[in-house]
Amino acid sequence: MRISVATDSLDGVAELIVDELRRRGHTVVAHGAVAEPADTDWAVVSADAAREVATGDADMAVVACWTGTGASIAANKVPGVRAALCADAATAAGARTWNDANVLALSLRLVSAPALGEILDAWFAAEPSAEAQDVANIAHLENLDHMPSTKEPSLRPMSWRPVSHRRRCRRPRIPHRYAPTFFTVQRPHGITNGNPRGPSTPAIRSQRE
């Protein structure tokens, strides 16, 4: 197989990934820190490796960064790519079987040399499921690659209704019997609202009184 490999550093099993794939007889196309000249931008190198899978220039890809998360996110941004972050053999086998994953993402922090061998064994040994439900799910993923990221705008604007049918914000009407009336309270001289020399102030009295 022709396999693209991308890492953003030489930490952990980065170089061992290339060596192990070549030992198994695969042709490796290197990107990132394992290539010359080296590039350490995980978003760039992971997408470059994944894009070769999408265009058919590579059969599969292996992308890796310190946690593996960034590499998998960048790879999955490429339409047609199904990258799976795997830390053990069982996850790798499941990703190939049920998800038809075509890009393997690895954590340079977590994956040891023995674990790498087990993951690659499981990855290459598994085959995509032929069950109807699994096939339908993969087909749905392929459709999502071509769907817009936002909902299509409505062909009919929100203000299509006649003006008379629109809701208006009106002040609530107060029944006449509850409507307040204003009058001036006449108090004895010098006792107006507690202010000996202040003016008279309006008071509110309901017409029900």
Image (spheres, rainbow, N blue to C red):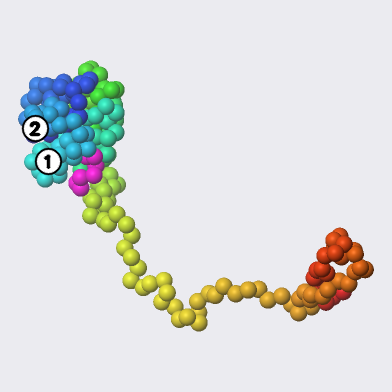
Disc 1, disc 2: CB below 8 Å?
yes
Q: Which mark is residue 29?
A: 2
Q: Which residues are magenta?
A: 74-80
**Label 2: which secondary element:** strand
- Mark closest to the chain's N terminus, 1 or 2: 2
Q: Which amino acid, by three-letter code, is at mark 2? A: Val
Q: Is residue 65 visible?
A: yes
Q: Which mark is residue 20?
A: none
**136 or 46: nearer the eye?**
46
Q: Which amino acid, by three-letter code, is at mark 1? A: Glu
Query: Left or right: 179 with respect to 30?
Result: right
* In the image, farthest residue toward the front: 197
**10 or 122: nearer the eye?**
10
Q: Quadrant of residue 180?
A: bottom right
Query: Which quarter of the rendered picture does the N terminus lie within?
Result: top left
| Magenta stretch contains residue 78 | yes
Residue 12 horizontal/vertical position (percent): 22, 20
**Label 1: which secondary element:** helix
> Which residue position holds label 1?
52
* In the image, farthest residue toward the right: 188
Residue 41 horizontal/vertical position (percent): 20, 34
What residue is drawn where x is 23% and y is 44%?
77
